[in-house]
Image (cartoon, rainbow, N blue to C red):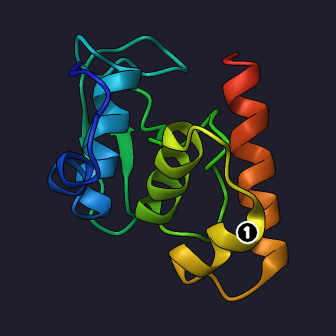
Amino acid sequence: MTAFSRSLLDFQRRFPGDGACAAYLVEARWPEGFVCPACGHGKGWRLSARAFTIECAASHRQTSVTRGTVMHGAKLVLTVWFWAAYRIASDPNGISALPLQKRLGLGSYKTAWLLAHKLRRAMVAPG
């Protein structure tokens, strides 16, 4: 896995869309290739009908790349999560929910607050 992006431009190049974000999550979760969490089988395929989901070739269990993360089940797109995480992690003084809402173009303060709260909690407790 590559190092943390040090500049905004580097971050934009590295994560231009949801596909790049999902690929990063796959690499972070399974650095040596997909392994089914249910049966341990090492082969699977991506489902075209369900975004960012891999189905095990043996057990046919479907696993989302966001499973077990703060992003799982959220309605926000992956790029918003990644941008928010970058802003929170890279701002030396921290960033509150209101500027986060404005900079990411989120519809409500509540969404921005929940997003920031979940990310901060995950950054403190990596497990």
- The residue depicted at 42 percent of the width and 38 percent of the height is 60
Taking 95 as reference, is 104 above or below it? Answer: below
Q: Which residue is mark 1?
A: 112
Q: Is residue 56 visible?
A: no
- The residue depicted at 29 percent of the width and 37 percent of the height is 24
Counting labels gives 1
Residue placed most toward the observer, 107 or 95: 95
- Percent x, y of residue 95: 67, 53
- Percent x, y of residue 11: 26, 48
> Circle 1: is it few (<14), some (14-19), or many (20+) Cα within 10 Å?
many
Residue placed most toward the observer, 41 or 82: 82
- The residue depicted at 68 percent of the width and 89 percent of the height is 107
Badge 1 amino acid: Ala
Taking 30 as reference, is 68 above or below it? Answer: below
Q: Secondary structure at mark 1?
A: helix
- Percent x, y of residue 1: 23, 18
Residue placed most toward the observer, 119 or 77: 119
- The residue depicted at 37 percent of the width and 53 percent of the height is 52
In the image, is 120 to the left or to the right of 28? right
Q: Which corner quadrant of the image does residue 100 belong to?
A: bottom right
Q: Quick one: which residue is furthest to the bottom in this view?
A: 107
Taking 8 as reference, is 62 above or below it? Answer: above
- Percent x, y of residue 73: 67, 57
In the image, is 42 to the left or to the right of 112? left
The quarter in which the C terminus is drawn is top right
In the image, is 63 to the left or to the right of 41? right
Q: Is residue 88 visible?
A: yes
